[in-house]
Amino acid sequence: MKEIDLRSDTVTRPTKGMLQAIMTAEVGDDVYKEDPTINKLEKKLADMFGKEEALFFPTGSMANQAAIKLHTQPGEQLICDKWAHVYNYEGGGVSFNSGVSCKLVDGVRGMITAQQVEENINPPDFYHSPLTTLVCLENTTNKGGGACYDLEEIKKIRQVCNQHELGLHLDGARLFNALVKKKEDPKDYGKLFDTISVCLSKGLGTPMGSVLIGDKELMKNAIRIRKVLGGGMRQVGFMAAAGIYALDNHLEQLEKDNERASEIADMLEELDYVEKVEPVETNIIIFYLKNAENEEEFLKQLSEKNIRISNMGQGKLRIVTHLDYSEEMHHFFLETLRNLDLP
């Protein structure tokens, strides 16, 4: 059995069909907006979400950071969950790039409510505190184990943002997993959010790239901010071709990823050495061993079977299913979990 890498859905490699699309892509200079394949990808995603504009970025973090910059001015504040990717995993970029602070909310599995947003808006006439101007949500939630927002709650958050004239940005790195799971229409998200970042290199399996989607007026400075952040690219249509191929061919695979994650969670629930498995909705499983001292041995035994998963610290272990995780690997992994020798 070849290596089974379940640390993240970022470890995938291009399929043969995707490689063919990359090799045959028509390209140009994207700094001049002359790359036809990039232009095609951006239009495809803008249309999918019912928005006017879209812009390709090399990374999801850069797309999120550009969105925050578009929405805010230095000294202002955004509201997000305490587990949000923009706060925890983007190198302090919110403060470094935009001069903005984060008001952290104690949500549930990385998700916050409209009431919590309302409660955490600073009074605009109280000049001692930062001016609240933006709310950032994440769907699905990374640290929350792939949890999906309820669309009705997002609608309520939108109403709060409208009442207080706040921007609303979605970190949609794994949004497609949520759309497949909940059978939702991307255009419903386009109606609710001012900006949305979607990642092509996670569940969809491309080598790189995220796209920031939004309305024309807000997005007019996005390409300038991308340049300032170092994101000017040339013949990047090769990567856009991978994204178009993924959108046309890999969306159905996300349902299989979600199903396999649920089956792994069911198996873990049955094992004596597992203390707790957090609820699983999409392709991320977070679980805890009964005896934290067994973590090293647990990971060692998996490694001996050529299986890799993530240790997130504080007893939290993570498994992420993805495009390169086959049915054969799935059965082997389940059997391995069942037969591990742990006290």
Image (cartoon, rainbow, N blue to C red):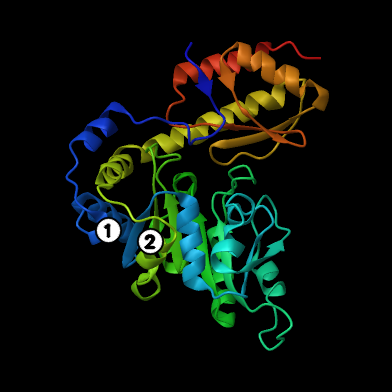
Q: Which residue is mark 1?
A: 31
User: Compared to 230, does 194 lie above or below?
Assistant: below
Query: Residue at the spot x=49%, y=18% of the render?
Result: 329
Q: Which of the 4 image quarters holds residue 297?
A: top right
> Where does the image place residue 6, in percent across and percent down from the top left?
55, 28
What amino acid type should be assigned to the residue bearing mark 1?
Val
Q: Quadrant of the C terminus?
A: top right
Q: Residues within 10 Å of mark 2 (few under 14, many from 20)?
A: few
> Where does the image place residue 323, in percent across and percent down from the top left?
42, 31
Question: Which label belongs to residue 227?
Answer: 2
Q: Residue 291: in sight, yes or no?
A: no
For mark 1, give the secondary structure.
helix
What amino acid type should be assigned to the residue bearing mark 2?
Lys
Taking depth in this image into account, of 238 and 154 the one nearest to the observer is 238
Q: Which of the 4 image quarters holds residue 118?
A: bottom right
Q: Residue 268: in sight, yes or no?
A: yes
Q: Are marks 2 and 1 in contact (CB under 8 Å)?
A: yes
Query: Residue at the spot x=62%, y=11% of the render?
Result: 304
Q: CA distance from mark 2 to mark 1?
A: 9 Å
> Where does the image place residue 68, in percent across and percent down from the top left?
52, 66
For mark 2, give the secondary structure.
helix
User: Compared to 137, does 60 lie above or below?
Assistant: above
Taking depth in this image into account, of 231 and 23 the one nearest to the observer is 231
Query: Residue at the spot x=70%, y=53% of the render?
Result: 108
Query: Residue at the spot x=50%, y=17% of the render?
Result: 3
Q: Residues within 10 Å of mark 1 (few under 14, many from 20)?
A: some
Question: Which label belongs to residue 325?
Answer: none
| Image-based side of 58 in relation to 44, left or right | right
Which badge, 2 or 1, comes first in the chain's sequence? 1
> Where does the image place residue 11, in percent across and percent down from the top left?
47, 31
